[in-house]
Amino acid sequence: MKALLVIDVQKAMIEGDSPVFQSDLVLRNIKHLIDQARKEHILIIYVQHNEDGSEFENGSRTWEIVDDIKPHKKDPIVQKRRPDSFKNTTLKSILDEHHVDELIIVGMQTEFCVNATSLKAVELGYQVSVVSDAHTTFNGKLSAEKIITQHHKKWSKVLKLVTSSEVSF
């Protein structure tokens, strides 16, 4: 059974003077995948980062999931405090409950939460596909483009990379 895992697509990532790299394109691709998954009755799990005293503080406006991809009432939302979405969360139990063995992963930030969660999922024995045009990060010491390229190279050794047009539910 497949599931779509949407990691940290929160308002703090796309609002303000410096949104994540290619935010419009990435959001469009994520929305397309969510719409596809809904049509095929695929489980969609949202992950939401929490950090006290920051723009990710639980309940703040910027902590909220982006309006264009808001979860439906039946969609599980996993609250986390670490980059690894499995660490001290309900994610594994949700996946077990729904007999999920394959994860399609999208979201933010490439080098933190997407990376940690994807690698942990592989370690736990899930078949993992990261959607190469549906994850992103901020420019920092390295450009976001370079960070993404480096992670694609690293990930290609342990998981599957697909484009949003290649995903089939």
Image (spheres, grey):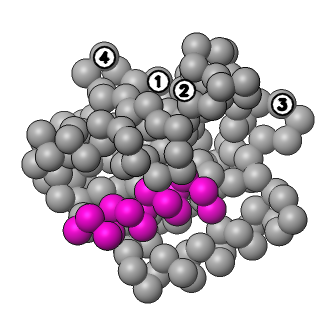
| Residue 75 image offset from top left, x and y in percent | 30, 27
Q: Which three-letter amino acid code belongs to the residue tagged 3? A: Gly
Q: Is residue 109 visible?
A: yes
Q: Which residue is mark 2?
A: 65
Q: Which residue is mark 3?
A: 16
Cα–Cα span, label 2 and label 1: 6 Å
Label 2: element kind: loop
Pair 2/1: label in front:
2
Q: Which residue is mark 1?
A: 70
The answer to whether 147 appears left or right of 122 in the picture is right
| Residue 50 image offset from top left, x and y in percent | 57, 30
Label 3: element kind: loop
Q: Residues within 10 Å of mark 3 (few under 14, many from 20)?
A: few
Q: Write down the region rendered in magenta.
A: 111-125
| Residue 82 image offset from top left, x and y in percent | 53, 45
Q: Is residue 116 magenta?
A: yes
Please say if the residues under marks 4 and 2 sit with CB atoms less than 8 Å apart.
Answer: no
Cα–Cα span, label 2 and label 3: 15 Å
Q: Is residue 121 magenta?
A: yes
Please say if the residues under marks 3 and 1 sit with CB atoms less than 8 Å apart.
Answer: no
Q: Which three-letter amino acid code belongs to the residue tagged 4? A: Lys
Q: Which residue is mark 4?
A: 73
The image quadrant of residue 93 is top left
Label 1: element kind: loop
Q: Residue at x 30, y 56 (%)?
A: 103
Please say if the residues under marks 2 and 1 sit with CB atoms less than 8 Å apart.
Answer: yes
Q: Residues within 10 Å of mark 2 (few under 14, many from 20)?
A: many
Cα–Cα span, label 4 and label 2: 13 Å
Q: Give whichever of 51, 130 is nearer the camera.
A: 51
